[in-house]
Image (cartoon, rainbow, N blue to C red):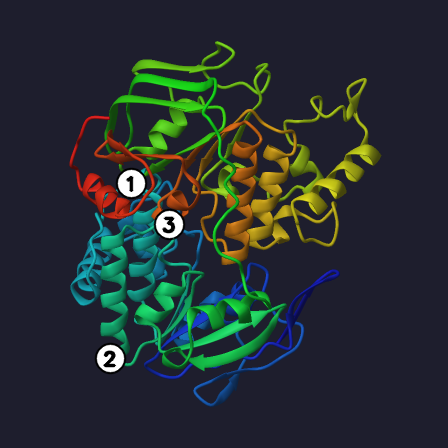
Amino acid sequence: MWKRYAATVALSGASFSVRRGEIHALLGENGAGKTTLMNVLDGITRPDEGEIFWRGERVSIDSPQTAARLGIGMVHQHDRLVPAMTVAENFALALGQSFWVDPAQARRLIRATVEKYGGHVDPDAVVRELSVGQRQWVSLLRALARDVSLLVLDEPTTTLTPQERDTLFATLRQSRASGLSVVFITHKLDEVFAVCDRVTVMRDGSEVATLDVAATTPGDLVALMVGRRVEEGFDRVPMAPGTVLLSVSGVASAGERLKVQDIDLEVRAGEIVGVAGVDGNGQREVIEVITGVRRPEAGHVVFRDGTSGWSHDKAMHVARIPEDRHRHGLALGLALWENIHLGRWKQRGLVRRGIVDRRRALAACAESMKRFDVRASGPTQPAGELSGGNQQKAVLARELADAPDLVVAMNPCRGLDIAASRFVLEQLLAVRNGGGGVLFVSYDLDEILAIADRVLVMASGRIAGEVLPGPGVADRIGALMGGEVVGR
C-alpha cells in the first residue's frame, strides 16, 4: 500500500494482514504509517497504490460507509462524536438515522450493547459534558453496536481509567472468542503482552516485522520500532527549589461533573510538580482555573510577578501545553509557521508596523522545527497533515522555544510513541534543569514518577495527599487515588 502527501510518503509499500478471531497489535513511532494504513482500511483515506482483500476477495473501500457494510469499524484516537448531541443521539447516527432520531431505538441499542460487551454509558448525557475517557468508551460501544467483524482501535486506552482498561481487555477477550478480529494500535508495550496474539511493527511507512507476541520481548519491539535501543532513565540535575512561581490557595470551582475545592499547591523554580489521579477527579478543572479558562468560586491563583488570571503579556513567561492538541493546541488548517508563532509574533520581533515579516517568520519556524525535531515537508505544511507526535512537537516549539519561567502541561504525552514521549519529558526536564518550574498533570503514573520532584494526588475534586518519588511510592499513590485523604 502506498500513500503520499506532497513530498511526504506516509505509506511505502506497506503490507498487513489479520486473522479471524485474533487481537493483532500494530506498533510504530508516530508517523510510521499505522493510522494512515488503518484509515485506508476504514475508507477514510484513498491510497495511491495497493490492493485490499477482505475474506479472500479483492474489494474497493471508498468510504467509511462501504467499510461498515463489509463489517469493518474503527474507533479513532480523537473521538468523532457530535459534542452537542446526547449519547443516545450519537448511537442513532450509527444506525444511519441522520435526519430523524428514534431515541427509544437508540436506548434499546445501548442496552443491548452494554449487556453484550460490558461497560456503562448514560444515554441522556450530552457528549460535551463527558470526560475524554467517557467519550472514548462511548465511541467504542457505538462501533461494537454495529456488529462488526473487524474492529480497529487507535490508542483506545489513552484516556481510560485502569478499571475501564481492564473492562476493555475483558471485552476484547470475550469478543475474540466469538470470532471478532481486532487491530490494536498502541504505544504501550505492557498492553501488547497483556491482550494481543500477534504484533506488526511499522517504520517509515513500511512493515518491519510481524511476530507472535509470545515469541518476542519489549526490548526487541522497541528496537524494531525506532531502529535502535532506547536508553532508559533521565538526566536529572540536582536542584534546590527556589522562588515560588505559582501559588494556588483555597481554590474551589464547580465543574460539569464534580466540584473541586480546597486546592492548595505551589510550584517553585527548579522543580517539577506532578499531579496524579484517575481522569475525572478534578485535574482538568484545576488547570482551567490556573490558565484562566475557568473562574474560581473561591480562592486565588497568583504568579511570581503578582498577577492572577492568564495573560501572555505578563512579565513572567508562562507556557501552556494543553491536553488536546487538536482542539486547544493547534489550528489544524493553518501552516506550521503560523502555528509555531501563534500568540508570539510581537514577542519574537516578527511584526513590523503591524505587518508580519513572513521571511523572518519562516526562517525562525525552520530553526524551531530543527530544534524540536518537528518532521514535516516544511514550514508551510498544514499542521493537520502531521502525525500526532509531530503535532505535539509543534506545540512544544511554540510554547518552550522562548525559555518559559513556568510550564503548565496536561497529558503532554497522550497518544505519543515511546521516543516522542521521551522527547517531551526531556523538554520538561530541560525547563526544570534550567531553573524554571513545571506543573505536570498526567494520567500515566510512570511518566510522573520518571521526572517529578513531588507528586500531588487528586481524588474526588481534592488533593488527597503529597508524596515524594521513591521505592513503593506507586502503591501509596494508588491508595490515595482510591480516596484515602491524608495531610500534606
Residue 39 lies, with reference to residue 309, above or below; the image says below
The residue pinned by badge 2 equals: 177
Amino acid on which disc 1 is placed: Gly
The residue pinned by badge 1 equals: 277
Amino acid on which disc 2 is placed: Ala
Q: Is residue 72 left or right of residue 235?
A: left
Q: Earlier in the sequence, mark 1 or mark 2?
A: 2
Q: Residues within 10 Å of mark 1 (few under 14, many from 20)?
A: many
Q: Which percent across, then down, holds residue 22? A: 34, 79
Q: Which percent across, then down, holds residue 56? A: 46, 90
Q: Residues within 10 Å of mark 2 (few under 14, many from 20)?
A: few
Q: Is residue 103 left or right of residue 309?
A: left
Mark 2 and mark 3: Cα distance apart in space: 32 Å
Name the mark on residue 316. Answer: none
Amino acid on which disc 3 is placed: Asp
The residue pinned by badge 3 equals: 446
Q: Is residue 263 left or right of residue 356?
A: left
- In which quadrant of the rendered view does residue 267 lie? top left
Mark 1 and mark 2: Cα distance apart in space: 33 Å
The answer to whether one can see residue 42 in this image is: no
- Comparing 44 with 11, the one in front is 11
- In which quadrant of the rendered view does residue 323 lie? top left
Q: Earlier in the sequence, mark 2 or mark 3?
A: 2
Q: Which percent across, then down, holds residue 238? A: 49, 34
The answer to whether one can see residue 128 in this image is: yes
Q: Earlier in the sequence, mark 3 or mark 1?
A: 1
